[in-house]
Image (tube, rainbow, N blue to C red):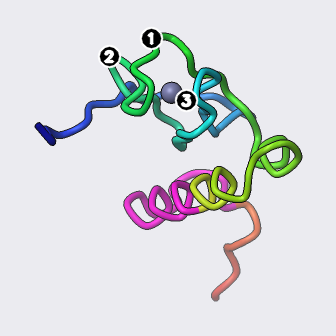
Amino acid sequence: MTSTQSFWPVSHRDDDFWVCMSCLGEVYYRKVPMPECPSCHGVSTYEGFTLEAIRDWGTEDLIAKAVAAQQAAAVAQPAVESTASVEATD
Ligand SMILES: [Zn+2]
C-alpha cells in the first residue's frame, strides 16, 4: 500500500515549488509526484510557484510543507549550484 512514491525531477529557474492546484494540500520542491497527486489523485495538477508566492496565498500548513521540502532537498543535495556568496575561506 505504501509503496515508494516516485517523482519527476523538475528543474526550473524560479518556480521551484510545485503545488497541486486541485487539492492545494501537496507541495514539492523541484519535483512532482508521478503518476498522480498522492492526496487527490489528480493528474497534471501541479503548477510551479516561488516560495514567496506560496507564502502569499498558501495555508500555514502548505507553507510549512514547502519550507520543510526545501530544507530536506538542501540536506540531501548539498549546494553545488548557486553558492555565489560563499567562497572566501583562504
Ligand atoms: Zn492533489
Q: Give residue 34's quadrant in the image.
A: top left
Residue 11's disc is 3
- Would residue 85 be counted in the magenta stretch? no
Counting residues from the start of the chain, the first of labels 2 and 3 encountered is 3
Instruction: Look at mark 1 in the image and give the residue it sits on.
Output: 43
The residue nearer to you, when weighing 64 against 39, is 39
The relative height of residue 37 versus residue 62 in the rendered view (above or below) is above
Q: Which amino acid does label 1 sit on?
A: Val
Of all residues, the one furthest to the right in this rendering is 56
The relative height of residue 63 versus residue 16 in the rendered view (above or below) is below
Q: What residue type is labelled 2?
A: Pro
The residue that appears at 45% across and 62% down in the rendered structure is: 72
CB under 8 Å between callouts 1 and 2?
yes
Q: What stretch is highlighted in magenta?
A: 68-83
Position of residue 11 in the picture relative to residue 12 (left or right) = left
The residue that appears at 61% across and 52% down in the rendered structure is: 66
Element type at mark 2: loop
In three-dimensional space, the C-alpha distance between marks 1 and 2, rounded to whole angstroms, equals: 7 Å
Element type at mark 3: loop
Instruction: Look at mark 2 in the image and give the residue it sits on.
Output: 35
Residue 80's disc is none
